[in-house]
Image: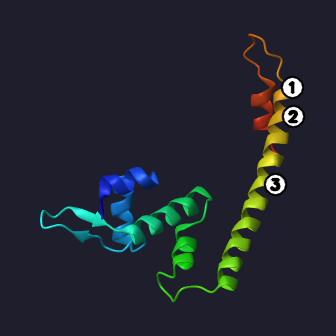
Amino acid sequence: MVSIGDLSSKTGVKIETIRYFERIGLMPIAERKSSGHRVYDETSLRRLTFIGRCRELGFSQADIRSLLGVEDNTPSCDEILSITTHHRTSIKAKISDLRKLERRLSEISSTCLSNDTPVCPIIESLSEIY
């Protein structure tokens, strides 16, 4: 059994976030010592590690709930694959959009005269009506 501080240190998840996850049902309500302090077992450590890694990978709270089977039964491997595939597709679309954005900003930046005049081609380009 570990304290909330130790759980936080081991997982890299802030204490307030752990409490929040308990309030919204991603984490089970922790057992308490007679002093009232929360204590967590290995299962809680593994679950919080899982949640933290899902967040690092950009899964939504709804996806994490589904992966954990919070509202329903534990999902099948096929259901987990479906959630993961959908998330990956979404990431690919975002990457594509970011590449387009980077190209556009590169184009705009290449017009910069880099001088002291108040007229800036970047501002002019961003102000163009399409």
Q: Which mark is residue 111?
A: 1
Task: Using residue 119 as the reference point, say whether residue 38 is left or right of it.
Answer: left
Q: Which mark is residue 96?
A: 3
Total marks shown come to: 3
Q: Mark 1 falls on what kind of element?
A: loop
Q: Which mark is residue 45?
A: none
**Is disc 3 surrounded by few (<14), some (14 to 19) or many (20+) residues within 10 Å?**
few
**What residue appears at the point 83 percent right and 17 percent down from the top-left corner?**
113
**Mark 1 and 2 residues: CB-CB less than 8 Å, in contact?**
yes
Q: How far apart in space, not on screen, are marks 1 and 3 (Cα)?
A: 24 Å
Amino acid on which disc 3 is placed: Ser
Amino acid on which disc 1 is placed: Thr
Residue 32 image point, x, y percent: 21, 69
Q: Nearer the viewer, residue 114 or 70?
A: 70
Of the image marks 2 and 3, the number of the one nearer the N terminus: 3
Amino acid on which disc 2 is placed: Glu
Q: How far apart in space, not on screen, are marks 2 and 3 (Cα)?
A: 17 Å
Q: Quadrant of residue 91?
A: bottom right
Which residue does the numbered mark 2 point to in the structure image? 107
